[in-house]
Image (spheres, helix red, strand yellow):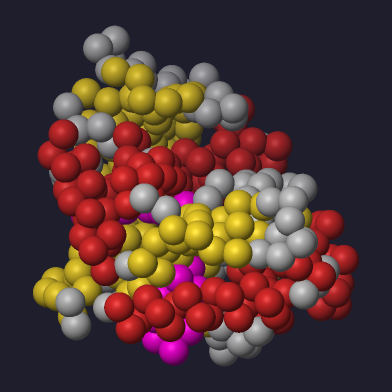
Amino acid sequence: MKTVHYRLHDKVFALRADDPVLQATMEKALRYKGAKPTDGTAVDLKMHYVQAGTIPEMPAEAALITRSPEGLSVAYVDDTYYVAHADALVVIDAPEGTAQGYVGASLLTETQALVRFYLVTIGVVILLRYQERYGLHTAALVRDGAGVLLVAQSGSGKSTTTLNLVRAGWQHLSDDTVLLRRLPEAVEGDRVEALSFRHDFCIKHEMLAQFPALGAHEWPPSMSDPTKWRVDPDVLYPGQFVPRCRPRLVLLPEIVDAPTSRLEPIRAATVLQHLSTQAGALLTPRPHIVQKHLSLLSDLMQQVMCLRFLAGRDALTDPEASVRLIGNALREAQQVA
């Protein structure tokens, strides 16, 4: 198979596989993260995956970082990382910007598509961290040029709030994941910007009751969760996507049993800890990478106002109320900045 190139913001990936299923998986995973085909005149990162009859063994001295329910484990020795499965191994030389994958035939079936997807995307995330592009589990919205990050895990009301804001005319980067990077130089005092790292929204089927427009189209299942739809927001809300923003407001959403939604102050240390957790800081536990990552999060804290968003029942019954609440907070954050 020939090498193909994809651009993700300012980074170019060179992708190559000796098997059409692996090639399709690699390209699909990069497109899912928002990358676009390019001529690839200057390559930053290389990923080469092959079908292998014999899978290399991970070094015995590799230190485990995490395991996933899909049977994947991530480990490392110095700055080399290993994504291992019973029938696969991806070796990531992070400083060199390369990922070499060995995949057994048992993983080339349709039922193993999610495992193949993670074999690629975990490599992408690790490679990007060494390029000082750090993933963050957050929705990102924009109003009048200023960014809002809704940082929370699933079940916090993040998707409902995101759709309420987008339906009200706000722009969006993502409903789930962005990349944070340091600006080459401070712009109006800002040091950190957020980059889109997944364009499509992943929406639970039951949200159709609140957002009837979802029912006007047939949506494919989410790649990572088949119980959710993979919704193209450009179909529902054309022209509202933006690829980047400079955050001004960080909200930690939480569903509460109360008639009205409200905002309340939150300690900076609590927010920083939450950001670190949702950024997966320990996915690359090397001290020099962790230090750079935490330094960037500290810079982010200097340019944003942080609040807890307690989403009451009016988030469902009167969505405009929460839109006004967050809009007012964003205007206040801009004035403070």
Residue 260, above or below 58: below
Using the rendered view, name the quadrant where residue 162 is placed.
bottom right
**Residue 281 appears in the rendering:** yes
User: Is 288 inside the magenta-drawn segment?
Assistant: no
Up/down of 104 relative to 272, above or below: above
* Range shown magenta: 131-148
Q: Identify the residue at image location x=42%, y=53%.
A: 266
Q: Residue 59's quadrant in the figure?
A: top left
x and y percentages locating residue 36 in the rendered image: 43, 72
In the figure, residue 216 lies in which quadrant? bottom right
Closer to the camera, 141 or 112? 141
Q: Nearer the viewer, residue 252 or 98?
A: 252
Q: Where is residue 7 in the image (x, y as percent from the top left)?
A: 35, 69
Q: Does the magenta stretch include residue 147?
A: yes
Q: Which residue is drawn at 64% across and 73% down?
A: 322
Q: Does residue 218 appear in the picture of this structure?
A: no
Along the line of sight, the residue nearer the viewer: 318 or 132: 318
Which residue shows up at 34% across the image and 28% down it? 82
Residue 132 spot, x, y in % from top left:
22, 55
Q: Main secondary structure of the magenta part?
A: strand
Relative placement, left or right, of 128 versus 213 is left
127 left or right of 148 in image = left
